[in-house]
Image: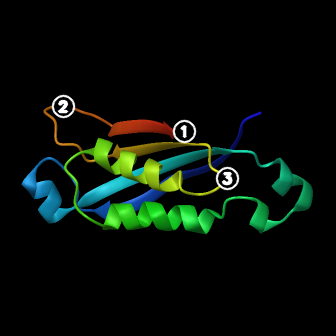
Amino acid sequence: MTDRIVLAGMKFFAHHGALQTERTNGQDFVVDVELEADLSEAGRTDDLERTIDYRRVYDIVKDTMEGESRSLLEALADSMARRLLTFDRVQAATVRVRKPQVKLPGPLDYSSVEVRRERR
């Protein structure tokens, strides 16, 4: 059985990117997180201590997005996923980082990177 907690569409203004102008001026980012864990005990007991507190997940994402500037979306997503695996109940973490304002010579909704990391 695989249960999931999903936080979708977390929005941040941050200073990441391969171009110096992206790191200097900043831009919008959107982050989605999916955490795989056994949530059956939380479902039976209705006890916050038996699940993964969304606030703690959000804090890790926010800290990463507002922290050290990274060149690559891959580095941001990897850092978040590895930090989220430190929660006791999390068996796997999938992180998607989207960049809506990509500078390309044609139309594009966004660029995105998705990583999935598992507890070993």
Find the distance from the CA under tag 3 to the CA under tag 1: 13 Å
Q: Amino acid at mark 1?
A: Arg
- Residue at figure coordinates x 67%, y 52% from the top left: 89
Determine whether the residue tagged by mark 2 lies in a helix, strand or loop. Answer: loop
**Residue 109, position as x, y percentages in the image:** 33, 38
Q: Quadrant of the N terminus?
A: top right
- Residue at figure coordinates x 48%, y 37% from the top left: 116
**Residue 6, position as x, y percentages in the image:** 62, 48
**Residue topped by disc 3:** 89
Determine whether the residue tagged by mark 3 lies in a helix, strand or loop. Answer: loop
- Residue at figure coordinates x 22%, y 60% from the top left: 69
Image-quadrant location for residue 67: bottom left
Q: Quadrant of the C terminus?
A: top right
**Residue topped by disc 2:** 106
The reply to whether discs 2 and 1 touch (Cβ–Cβ < 8 Å) is: no
Q: Which one is closest to the eye, mark 2 or mark 3?
A: 3
Query: Vertically, is 27 above or below 100?
Result: below
Could you say which disc has been placed on residue 120 in the image?
Answer: 1
- Crowding near pointer 1: few (<14 within 10 Å), some, many (20+)? few
Q: Which one is closest to the eye, mark 2 or mark 1?
A: 1
Q: Which one is closest to the eye, mark 3 or mark 1?
A: 1
Looking at the image, is mark 2 or mark 3 earlier in the sequence?
Answer: 3
Looking at the image, is mark 3 or mark 1 earlier in the sequence?
Answer: 3
**Residue 98, position as x, y percentages in the image:** 37, 45
Find the distance from the CA under tag 2 to the CA under tag 1: 41 Å
